[in-house]
Amino acid sequence: MPTALLVHAHSESDSFVTAMRDRIAQTLAGQGYAITHSDLYAMNFNPVLSPADFGQRSTPDHLVYALEQRHNFESGTLAADIVTEIEKIRAADLIVLTFPLFWFSVPAILKGWFDRVFISGTFYGGKTIYGRGGMAGKKACAAFSLGGREDMFGERGIHGPLVHGMMRHLFQGTLGYIGADVIEPFVAHNVPYQPLEVRSRCLDELAEYFSDLDNHPRIPIPDLDKFGPRFEPL
Ligand SMILES: Cc1cc2nc3c(=O)[nH]c(=O)nc-3n(C[C@H](O)[C@H](O)[C@H](O)COP(=O)(O)O)c2cc1C
């Protein structure tokens, strides 16, 4: 049975984003997925990467986060809350992020989950990025809501392209960078200004989207075969 890890970043149980998360869980369970959760606010997840994450220091005088992430994970001294999240990811075939767009980005609690959980060595390294990253063989997708209208985005929109521009840092720079097969996200525009029936229709479209997930386009990720040993273009 495939497993889907739902990583959720909204504090309110009656919010639209939480309704999206619940509908995704229901839809994927109907597709035969076992569902696991990282409900970041409910867990009171600490999003601030700091030296307190490391029980040991390989370089006591000068802290290099990436180095200590590797060293502490290998020696079993990485903070327990991080290890728990890494194990959940390892057990999952699909990771789904649900969040409201904050400042052209993800909420801080989710950004901090990436910072602390996607550790060097396990998820990425000098040469092990993109197709060779630690999430190779796993799928990732997101469903997010935002205040802006759809016509504010795209090549001619005031804010420019959303998924391939504003949010490229997430889809290519984070999920793609660590090797996931990144599926185009589901986007719910203009949510705070929509009446209940429009929101309800949007949840139906979301369910339809997740019932056919494998057939959606992928986010283009650089092909490492087109780059040399120092990532120079061939
Ligand atoms: C701190 C903060 C930053 C936000 N930044 C953006 C933004 O950059 N673009 C946008 O379209 N909406 C932005 N919004 C609006 C939220 O994305 C929107 O209210 C949310 O998606 C609604 O979902 P909810 O009803 O489940 O909370 C922001 C809201 C907050 C509170």
Image: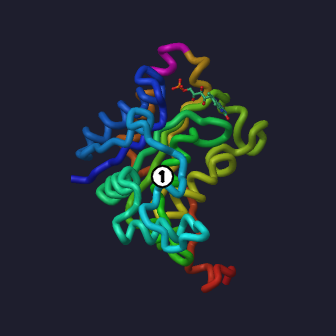
Residue lying furthest front in this view? 61
Horizontally, residue 139 falls left or right of residue 105, namely left
Horizontally, residue 33 falls left or right of residue 122, namely left
Using the rendered image of the protein, determine whether residue 218 is visible from the camera's viewpoint: no
Q: Residue at x 63, y 48 (%)?
A: 167
Rendered position, 170 above or below 16: below
Q: Nearer the viewer, residue 204 or 12?
A: 12
Q: Nearer the viewer, residue 131 or 112?
A: 112
Does the magenta run of residues contain 100?
A: no
The percent position of residue 92, horizontal first and vertical second, equals 32, 55
The stretch in magenta equals: 195-200
The percent position of residue 136, horizontal first and vertical second, equals 42, 67
Rendered position, 59 above or below 196: below
Q: Nearer the viewer, residue 162 or 170?
A: 170
Q: Secondary structure at mark 1?
A: loop
Which residue in the structure is indicated by mark 1?
183
Rendered position, 8 above or below 231: above
Magenta: main secondary structure equals helix
Residue lying furthest left in this view? 1
Horizontally, residue 17 falls left or right of residue 169, namely left
| Quadrant observed for ligand 1 in the rendered image | top right
The percent position of residue 199, horizontal first and vertical second, equals 49, 21
Q: Residue at x 37, y 42 (%)?
A: 38
The percent position of residue 46, horizontal first and vertical second, equals 47, 43
Q: Which of the 4 quarters of the picture holds residue 100? A: top right
